[in-house]
Structure formats: structure tokens, C-alpha cells
Image (cartoon, rainbow, N blue to C red):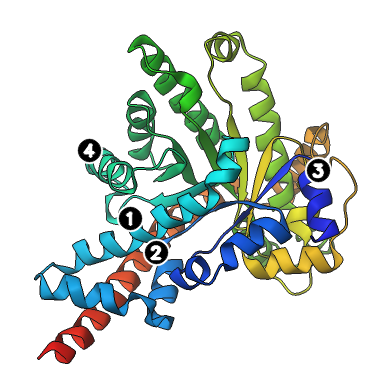
Amino acid sequence: MSDRLKALADAGVSIWLDDLSRERIETGNLADLVKEKSVVGVTTNPTIFAGAIADGERYDDQVRRLVAKGEPVDRVVFELTTDDVRNACDIMAPVFAETPADGRVSIEVEPDLANDTEGTMASARALWSAVDRPNVLIKIPATKEGLPAITAAVAEGISVNVTLIFGLQRYREVMDAYLSGLEQARDAGLDLGRIHSVASFFVSRVDTEVDKRLEAIGTDEAKALEGKAAVANARLAYAAYEEVVASDRWKVLANAGANPQRPLWASTGVKNEAYSDTLYVTELVVDGTVNTMPEKTMEAFADHGDLHGDTVTGKAGEAQQVFDGLAGVGIDFEDVLLVLEHEGVDKFKKSWTELVETVSGQMEKAGQGQA
């Protein structure tokens, strides 16, 4: 067992792997990560699946069978990905049995529906029903159109991972959408204890965009702020979360058995080589949160990650000073957030196209093999 990762888990941070493949499932690698690396959850996305399907022969037989049945590409994508997530849910079941907030595996609604509330709900229902495991989380993007879908999904008892959150205002709207869904679920007589949610607050992309703008400003004052916006933004998000769980509205739901919507730090792989490769783990340690990491980041932390106790609670004032500094040198953070959300949805859609193209290629090969 990695001592550093165990210490991180003991500090109250749930370590989730931001990756999944049939190879990880079938070779026992995922089960080993649970045993040896304190991994207690898994997140996926279309890019992860595209890589797994392109690189692995373990999908070939299933693709051939589906092609023989005449299934269209969207259906083949659905079958391949929901099978992997269902099997990963089964591997994570012992963790889930012990700690129901963890042992979770996330799968995304179709990204083309990011701006379509009804379509998102239909996709969420289809995935929830197909995976058919209580420890699956359905990923819904925090777009304006995604917010009502989050409420509707939670109201129906579907556990949700809200993804693509970049800014505080939208995060507050996400928390409100979750609470509204819980209130509707309670009024419908559902067991609130069975509904779980995480709010995936994106980290590294904030620094990437802000640093680019600071670099362009070029003053010493601007350069001194490089690499600080992402952590400050996440710490302010945590302060907003603390406000919500201290509210009377939340207390009523908690007394009815509801689970808090835990903050999840996403996009925690460090993109700037000038920064520590464990920056977005070390600086975001706080009890009751999730950090979903690419394996490279997890290995880096296991090897040389530092733990300085809780690095989030009580840091809102310091974080606000960073934002005051950014405003002072001319950074329009609202514009940063608009760009990030637009890019995020765009990447979300492109990764889906990449997955569909990858599967189409595999289907073509399978079809030739049957000819």
C-alpha cells in the first residue's frame, strides 16, 4: 500500500482514478489499485473510452457480435461503455458496501446534449437503467440547460456527478439544483439516503487560461500571480460549499437522510511543467472531498507527494486576495469562465466524436472480418 496515498485517504480525501479500460477490469489492475493505491472510485469520459477501445483487442468480440446484429454505431458505443462501467461497479462493490459515498463509477450523458435539457434527462435515464448498479454516477454537465436535468435526475433517485464546473456562481446554482432535486425526491417519498452526488470542480484548466493572460500582460505583478488562480478558485468553491451545508435548508434535508454533494476536484493533472506535478492534490486537501486523478498524477503523489494537513479550510480570505490581485492587473475572470465553459463543452463534444469515430473504425474492421 502506498503510504502517501493512504495518508491522503486518511486525511479524508477520496482518491478516484480518472481512467477505465476493459484491460484494467479483466487483468485485475483496477482491483489491485483499490487494494494497493487507496483507490475508491472511478471517473470516465469519452476520450478515456476512445483510447481504451483503440488500444485494446478486448473489445473486438463484442464489436463483432454487435456488427453482426446490425447495430448502429451509437448503440455499439452505448453497449461497450455501459458494459465496462457495470463491470467496474461490480469491482468497486465492496468499497461501496463499506462506504456508500465511494465505490462509485461515473459515466457521461451524450455530450451533444449539453445544451438540451430533455435530451440530457433521456440519456441519464437510459444510462442509469442500462448500467443497473446502485453505485453508478451519471455525469451531467453544469451548463444552464444541464441544471434542470440535474434537479430532475436527483428527483427521480438517480445519483449524479455534475461535471464541467469552473466558476463560483455556477457552482452555487449546481448546489441549488441538487437541493431542489432532493426536496422533490423527499416529497415523492423516495429514500434520500440512496441518492448521492459529487460536484466536479475543474482545476488545472483555470490556471492554463489565466496564466496565458498573465503572460500577455507581462508585468512583474502579473507574473507573480501565475499558477495561483486555480487553487484559489477551488478554495473559494469549498467555502461556498461550507455555507450551503451550514444552511437551514440543508439541515432539513440532512435530517431526512440526505447525503451532501461532495466537492470533487477534477482536471488535477498539472499541465505546466514549471509547477509541481502534485500541486492540485497537495493544495486541495480537505476532509469530505474527492480528488479524481489520472494515474500519472496518482503515481507522482505516491512517489513524492507532500501532505501539509488541511490546505483548504479557512483559506477563503487568502484566495480572495489572489482574485483581487488578478482584477488589479486587468484579468476579467468572468470572461475566463465563459471561455472555459465554452471550451469545456466543445472538448466534451469533440471527445464524443473521437469515440464514435474510433468505434466506427473498429466496426468497419469487424465487418471486413465477417465478409
Q: Secondary structure at mark 3?
A: helix
Residue at 52% of width from left, 54% of height from top? 91
- Compare residues 71 and 197 and report the one nearer the observer: 71
The answer to whether residue 99 shows anywhere in this view is no
Q: Earlier in the sequence, mark 2 or mark 4?
A: 2
Nearer to us of marks 1 and 2 is: 2
Q: Residues within 10 Å of mark 3 (few under 14, many from 20)?
A: few
Q: Pointer 1: what residue?
A: 111
Nearer to us of marks 3 and 2 is: 3
Distance between mark 3 and mark 1 Cα atoms: 35 Å
Q: Pointer 3: what residue?
A: 10
Distance between mark 1 and mark 2 Cα atoms: 9 Å
Nearer to us of marks 2 and 4 is: 2
- Verify CB contact (< 8 Å) between mark 3 and mark 1: no
Q: Earlier in the sequence, mark 3 or mark 1?
A: 3
Q: Secondary structure at mark 2?
A: helix
Distance between mark 4 and mark 3 Cα atoms: 40 Å
> In which quadrant of the rendered image does the C terminus lie?
bottom left
Residue flagged by tag 1: what amino acid is it? Pro
